[in-house]
Amino acid sequence: MTKTFRDEPFSPREGNGPTALPSTAAQDENRCGLLKLSENVRLETSPQSFWHRQGLWRTSQGGELGQWRQNLFSQDPQTFHLDAAAGAHPSIRAELRSAEDLASLYNVKPLQGPAMQREDKSQVTMALTDCDGELLFILREIAGGLPTSIEVYGRDGRLLATTLVDLDRPLLRFVDPEMRLIATAESPSLGANLTLAALRDVPSEAGIYPWEVHFEKEPYSNSSQLLKENLRWVVATAVQVRAIRDATRAAQKAGEEPSYITGREWYTGSMSLVAVLCVGLLLGSLFLVFRLVYPLAVKNEITNTFLKIPVRPVAVPGAGRYIGQPSRVVM
């Protein structure tokens, strides 16, 4: 039986039916790509470089649905970018945000949900925005002590989905506030039935394991809008973010430095070096301008051998030679 982090089911607020989730202006104008997913999606990670992480989302038959990336050599290396497909318009950006950021930037009220019933408040909040920075959804990750769970909120701060976490297997079940099943996700694939210990033997890229997500069929009475073809990416993003952050936590637990910290240090160092060079170039330019306006005084005596004026020979009576040409003797 699936074990959850709750001893008692969460009691939803009144009026937790399907919430209207309209598209943004940038999506309507096709400036931000729309990502549509099939009922079964595989989340894969491509080989990682020093500069970035990336991966693909595929159908069960191998067709490409979208791609994600993280630029480790950036000011905010933990930001997650999601594109509809290769060469398409940018679609989604996931950024770490505090409760104060959500309130000031997006006017979102404090989030309420199952995480508030837990004693452990080890939580991280991510804002999912379109390519113009318009808020779409909010993810809240709860990672303290137990396997990481995820909550999904609408742009108005309303709870849309939470997860039932298996304590023995890498298995997540997304349910709506009425506890109706939305999707099931398992690593490395659906039906693998591996324990968390056995998962460590599965090949991975930088500790990021593959996942597979299956969405329930819709529509049914009061079904969650997250089941719609153009909104399934929200659940898939929650699973992908969890996989990436689990890899970071595993690296920290093993005493290793996460890649995003190394990338941030290189970014900070390189930007500092560029700043020093720019300041040096500016000071050098000012010094040259100063010397053009106030040149150094020219000495009467020229010390450079190649710039000296040749000495004209002068006849000295009785000396039998010319001064300045000791090799020439007057006959």
Image (cartoon, helix red, strand yellow):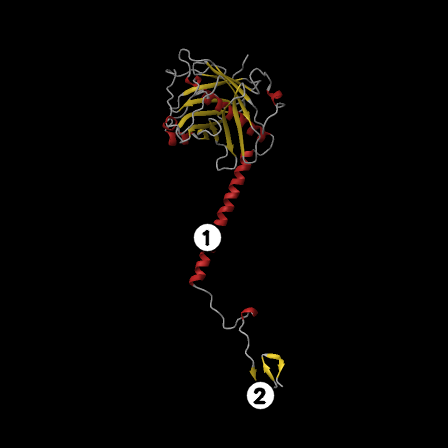
Residue 317: mark in rendering: 2
Q: Quadrant of the N terminus?
A: top right
Q: Taking the image as drawn, is residue 141 in sight?
A: yes
Could you say where residue 307 lies in the image, as x and y percent from the top left?
53, 69
Name the residue at 41% across, 32% down: 101
User: What is the three-letter code of the residue carrying label 1?
Assistant: Leu
Q: Extreme top residue here?
A: 221
Write down the residue under mark 1.
Answer: 282
Residue 10 at x, y percent in the picture = 45, 16
Amino acid type, residue under disc 2 in the picture: Pro
Q: Crowding at label 2, few (<14), some or many (≥20) Cα neighbours within 10 Å?
A: few
SS of the residue under disc 1: helix
Q: How many marks?
A: 2
**Mark 1 Cα within 10 Å, few/some/many (few <14, many 20+)?**
few
The residue drawn where x is 48% and y is 55% is 284
- The front one of 95 and 117 is 95
Q: Secondary structure at mark 2?
A: loop
Compared to residue 127, the image places residue 284 above or below, namely: below
Residue 115: in sight, yes or no?
no
Q: CA distance from mark 2 to mark 1?
A: 62 Å
- Residue 248 falls left or right of residue 226: right
> Which of the two labelled residues, at mark 2 and mark 1, occupies the earlier sequence position?
1
Q: Nearer the viewer, residue 310 or 247?
A: 310
Say above or below: 13 vs 93.
above
Q: Position of residue 166 (x, y in %)?
A: 54, 17
Above or below 19: residue 135: below
Residue farthest toward the bottom in the current orientation of the protein: 318
Q: Is residue 51 left or right of residue 131?
A: right
